[in-house]
Image (cartoon, grey):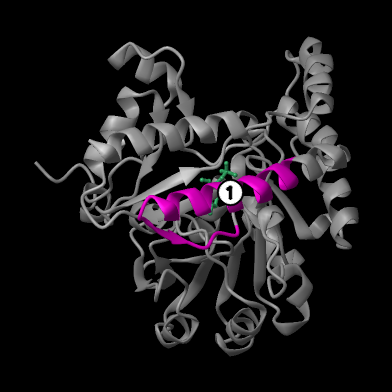
Amino acid sequence: MTNLVSSSIEQLKPYEAGKPIEELARELGVTDAVKLASNENPLGPSPRALEAVSAALSGLHRYPDAAAWELRSRLAARHGMSAAQVLQGNGSNELLELLVRTFVGPGEHVVFGEPSFVVYRLACLAHGVDFTAVPLRDYVFDIPAMIAAVTPQTKLLFIANPNNPTGTYVPRAALEQCLREVPPSVIVAIDEAYTEYADAPDFVSALELRGLRERLVVLRTFSKIYGLAALRVGYALGPADIIDYMNRVRAPFNVGTLGQVGALAALEDEAHVRASQELNQRERWRVGAALAGLGMTVVPSQANFIFVDIHRPSRPLYDALLLRGVIVRPVGGLPSCLRITLGLERENDRLLAALAEVLAT
Ligand code: PMP
């Protein structure tokens, strides 16, 4: 018999999501777990989004607006662009994959950093395209090495800014260098899922640097600070020709009605976004200092999670935290590290107490 799949799909491992609270209850009987594993907003969705979603329920027999016209128009106005430069996605995840599917053909090549968001690699493997994963240097993207990894076959280069899982960012000067020096034929995709959490003085969204290159796509999501991860809404901003090609390839009705109305309402709730930023900044500082006090290497974060190296296998610690009802995230390929999402103050206290207890034994 011939092989059922290509060797590249054979190598694929399914995306490993943070452990759901319900799964921990099923497996270990822990009923009051806190989940600090998926970089969600601990304050929950905006009440305005909940209201808008409820109000839309009676229309569920209708297909969604296939073009997500209102959402795209609102996003375009917000970013000073035209609706033709905006594409909605089933989470930004769909758009990352769509970039590979639309623009990278057989024999062509993609560059991304490592460790970074695992979906860049998964998308390349799923579509059988070559890639180079350029190691981070001191937990930060090595921009010169990424530029050097570009070949004549390279069509796409991914950067997560801030990065997942390290929480680090590419400072303005390095981002400018990347946008200027990567050959103009390459699409540079800047994944800004966590951009709203960044406050370093030299952090800049690539949207502000659009003048530096034509082939630039910026990805954003409603899953993080907007607290709507379950609705699956993200968007891409880029030149109209790139957006047009992606729009041809995407699935019809890729964002449902509840996602469209929820996202629109969440955009209006600036107070909720501000409260989420303030909580995250406070807790990022407090939890980071406490983790360092426990002897871990704490990587400075610009996101809503903290990456730590505990300098010994982290799996036993992960398991011991699970038994105490605290779900964090092991990091594939980095067996001494953990990624810890920042929660509410009391959730973070529970993490710190559980960690202190486990480390003392
Ligand atoms: N990019 C990065 C860097 C992420 O961490 C995530 C979520 N873990 C995503 C994209 C995808 O998010 P979503 O599909 O929910 O928009």
Instruction: Give the x, y percent position of residue 178.
Output: 58, 82
Decide: is 254 above or below 93. above
Q: Which residue is pictured at 30% across the width and 51% down the height? A: 332
* Picture quadrant of residue 357: top left
Q: Which residue is pictured at 84% across the width and 33% down the height? A: 265
Q: Residue furthest left?
A: 1
Decide: is 327 above or below 212. above
Task: Identify the residue under disc 1.
Answer: 286
| Residue type, mark 1 in image | Arg
* Quarter of the figure that contains the N terminus: top left
Which one is nearer the viewer's eye here, 24 or 253?
A: 24
Which one is nearer the viewer's eye here, 295 or 137?
A: 295
Give neighbour class at mark 1: few <14, some 14-19, many 20+ (Cα, 10 Å): few
Decide: is 227 above or below 250. above
Q: Which residues are magenta?
A: 276-302
Say what secondary structure mark 1 lies in: helix
* Quarter of the figure that contains the C terminus: top left
Residue 318 lies in the magenta-colored region: no
**Is residue 126 found left or right of 351 in the rendered image?**
left
Residue 283 lies in the magenta-colored region: yes
Q: Which residue is pictured at 53% across the width and 65% down the height? A: 168
Examine the rendering and report whether any part of residue 119 can be seen.
no
Examine the rendering and report whether any part of residue 51 can be seen.
yes
Magenta stretch: dominant secondary structure: helix
Instruction: Give the x, y percent position of residue 298.
Output: 44, 59
Instruction: Give the x, y percent position of residue 304.
Output: 59, 48
Instruction: Give the x, y percent position of residue 106.
Output: 37, 67
Decide: is 131 above or below 326. below
